[in-house]
Image (cartoon, rainbow, N blue to C red):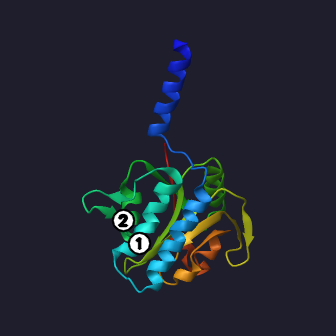
């Protein structure tokens, strides 16, 4: 009996420190996207609209990495970009134009690991796409096989989506600046 209790306690403790993909991640992500689109369509241009981007990581993986306690809110895209570059839990896999990086990203997502593609321009405006479990698909615009993804499109909120290839999120002209990160356990 003590052995069983010990095994259960060890399993629960590893869950609290690791990451896992929620069983209802698809509906959670869709809800965050719909909330984002509703906020943006109401012409609410403040930071509040961007809350769903960070909340999506929490609702899918129970990771609150994109919540800034000092500001008492979820981070903006530029803040997330800086965070990913400097946080020891997040590892750069590579660039969006590297086929091997795209394949690694899809494999990790299929293993229920958090994977993020991020782009930031010189004006500190950008976009984030979550790499989602699923299959890679050929992209005519990128000329590569791309992973399954979901994104929050700040420029055109109605183009926010879930369940499409990563190339739908970023035009070909941007792929040299798209960086892909994964969260290490």
- In the rendered image, which residue does mark 1 sit on? 50
x, y percent for residue 77: 41, 70
SS category of the residue bearing label 2: loop
**Residue at coordinates 53% horizontally, 25% vertically from top-left?**
8
Residue 61 shows up from this direction: yes
Name the residue beneath numbered marker 2.
75
Residue 19 screen position, x and y as percent:
51, 44
50 and 89: which one is in front? 50
Q: Do the CB atoms of the residues marked 2 and 1 lie less than 8 Å apart? A: yes
Percent from the top left, x then y, of residue 141? Answer: 69, 79
Q: Residue at x 45, y 81 (%)?
A: 40
Q: Quadrant of the N terminus?
A: top right
Say few, some or many: other residues with alpha carbon within 10 Å of mark 1 (under 14 / 14 to 19 / 20 or more): many
Determine the CA span between mark 2 and mark 1: 8 Å
Q: Is residue 71 above or below residue 19?
A: below
Total number of numbered labels?
Answer: 2
Work out whether residue 16 or residue 144 is closer to the camera in this orientation and state it: 16
Q: Is residue 116 above or below residue 11?
A: below
Disc on the earlier residue, 2 or 1: 1
Mark sitting on residue 140: none
Instruction: Left or right? Give the position of 158 relative to 50.
Output: right
Q: Is residue 162 found left or right of 152 in the rendered image?
A: right
Q: Residue at x 46, y 67 (%)?
A: 53
Q: Nearer the viewer, residue 116 or 43?
A: 43
Give the SS element for disc 1: helix
């Amino acid at each position: 009996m003590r052995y069983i209790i010990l095994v259960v306690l060890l399993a629960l403790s590893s869950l609290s420190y690791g990451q896992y993909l929620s069983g209802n991640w698809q509906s959670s992500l869709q809800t965050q996207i719909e909330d984002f689109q509703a906020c943006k369509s109401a012409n609410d241009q403040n930071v509040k609209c961007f809350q769903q981007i960070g909340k999506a990581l929490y609702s899918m993986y129970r990771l609150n990495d994109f919540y800034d306690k000092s500001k008492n809110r979820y981070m903006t895209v530029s803040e997330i970009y800086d965070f990913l570059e400097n946080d020891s839990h997040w590892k750069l896999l590579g660039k969006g134009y590297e086929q091997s990086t795209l394949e690694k990203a899809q494999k990790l997502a299929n293993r229920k690991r958090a994977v993020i593609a991020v782009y930031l321009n010189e004006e500190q405006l950008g976009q984030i796409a979550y790499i989602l479990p699923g299959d890679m698909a050929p992209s005519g615009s990128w000329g590569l096989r791309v992973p399954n993804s979901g994104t929050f499109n700040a420029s055109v909120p109605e183009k926010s989506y879930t369940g499409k290839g990563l190339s739908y999120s970023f035009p070909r002209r941007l792929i040299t600046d798209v960086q892909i990160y994964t969260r290490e356990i």
